[in-house]
Image (tube, helix red, strand yellow):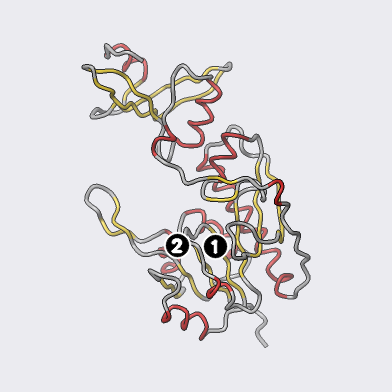
Amino acid sequence: MNNTPRIAFFGTSDFSVRVLEALKRNAIMPALIVTVSDKPVGRKHVLTPPPVKIWAEENKINFLQPVKLKDLDFLYKLKDKSYDLFVVAAYGKIIPSSVLELPKHGALNVHPSLLPRFRGAAPIETAILEEKETGVTIIRIDAEMDHGPIVSQQKLDIIWPQDAEIASKILAEAGGEMLARIIPAWIRNEIHEITQDESRATYTRKIETKDGEINLNDFPEKNWKKYLAYRHSPGVYFFTKRNQKDTRVIVTKALFENGQFIIQRVKPEGKKEMGYEDFKRGEKTTF
């Protein structure tokens, strides 16, 4: 008799792929991948698959890319296969109750924060801005955002001075390993859930381009934290005056040393990347 649970995995990003890789290392492979549609990327709008779709194809796993999760055909395909468990990691869409109620053992979500702190879209970046530590939590998904009972949680002292990309990698791998450890016990109904303390809940919002703007006159540590949080996306930048107009200058490399935020390389709008000292010597600007 085969006791391996049938799992459908919902995910999209590189974070999701790292969780999948951790499951694979532990011989837990999903029977189905659910991800988002291919999207146009770059100036030429090249239609590009999400990282999780690429992983599914490389590992020869069936995948679905529903536009709407309430689509009857999609619901039928999920219900027809009688999945034991859904696993969600950085999927990017709200999953309706009509989907969550399908698997026998519910749905588990890997969230990169110490819930109930930092619910929502940007837990890693917000932790970098506000904390010196964070962690990863696995919850059973319910009808509200990042609200369900805690199944497992691990604190990781990795935030300072890691940037968001490195922190995301560490948290995803830790979350995937944790998930691999608990799935067998979860299927056997051996794990006791812990209700989240609503009095401690905090929320994060979706990151916007304007969040990456820094003021060179701000406290150095504040600018350094913004650099760590936003350097990869949406990017960190400041404005200078050129010909009476504001010019955006992207910070491409910086460090924090002796309490100072030291910019090393920049990319001025419309120009190539250059050393910051070269930029300052060549520009008659007002910072």
Q: How far apart are labels 2 and 1 at the CA level?
A: 9 Å
Mark 1: secondary structure: helix
Task: Look at the picture and state if 120 lies above or below 76.
Answer: above
Mark 2: secondary structure: helix
Badge 2 is on which residue?
52
Quarter of the picture holding the C terminus: top left
Q: Nearer the viewer, residue 66 or 265?
A: 66
Task: Look at the picture and state if 70 lies above or below 153.
Answer: below
Q: Is residue 139 left or right of residue 237?
A: right
Image location of residue 252, percent across then percent down: 39, 30
Query: Picture quarter containing residue 126?
Result: top right
Image location of residue 123, percent across then percent down: 57, 46
Query: Picture quarter containing residue 250?
Result: top left
Badge 1 is on which residue?
20
Task: Check contact, mark 2 vs mark 1: CB within 8 A.
Answer: yes
Task: Look at the picture and state if 28 lies above or below 284.
Answer: below
Q: At x 24% / y 53%, what residue is drawn? A: 45
Q: Residues within 10 Å of mark 2 (few under 14, many from 20)?
A: many
Q: Is residue 118 left or right of residue 59?
A: right
Q: At x 51% / y 54%, what residue is drawn? A: 15
Amino acid residing under circle 2: Val
Image location of residue 68, percent across then percent down: 41, 70
Q: Which numbered disc flags the more N-terminal residue, 2 or 1? A: 1
Amino acid residing under circle 1: Leu
Q: Nearer the viewer, residue 105 or 16?
A: 105
